[in-house]
Amino acid sequence: MDENLSDLILAILSENFDKHFTLEELTSLVRPSADNGNPDVHRLNQAEVLDQLLILDDQGLLELNPDTDRSCMREESSNKKITQLQISAKNAK
């Protein structure tokens, strides 16, 4: 699993706990301007983000809604993951 990408996705979702993001919105937040207008690179970036979303959903850390194409942080996992991210940030210093 791409730890940096999954941590970034979880950080965005936990910072915006009451918001639900589409795949397009999350991709633009975690990989801004990475595609330089190239549709093939844009699709690759979306595929990488989707892969991470599926893994995080399997781990129970977020909720994917296939009917609306939106993702959000699961309430019970938000506090746990925020604490883990804070510990990781402190250890990195």
Image (spheres, rainbow, N blue to C red):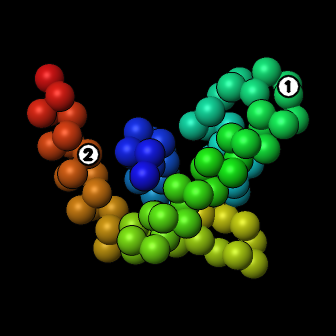
Q: Which circle's residue, 2 or 1, is located before the other in the chain?
A: 1
Mark 1 Cα shell of 10 Å, populated few (<14), some (14-19), many (≥20): few
Q: Which residue is drawn at 21% across and 51% down?
A: 84
Identify the residue at the far bottom of this view: 67
56 to the left or right of 76: right
**2 or 1: mark nearer the eye:** 1
Q: Which residue is drawn at 65% across and 75% down?
A: 65
Residue 40 in sight here:
yes
Name the amino acid type tagged 1.
Answer: Gly
x, y percentage for residue 46? Answer: 70, 47
Q: Please name the residue that numbered disc 2 is placed on.
A: 85
Q: How far apart are marks 2 and 1 (CA)?
A: 32 Å
29 to the left or right of 2: right
Mark 2 Cα shell of 10 Å, populated few (<14), some (14-19), many (≥20): some
Element type at mark 1: loop
Q: 34 and 44: which one is in front?
A: 44
51 to the left or right of 86: right
Of the numbered discs in the image, which one, if any, rests on residue 37?
Answer: 1
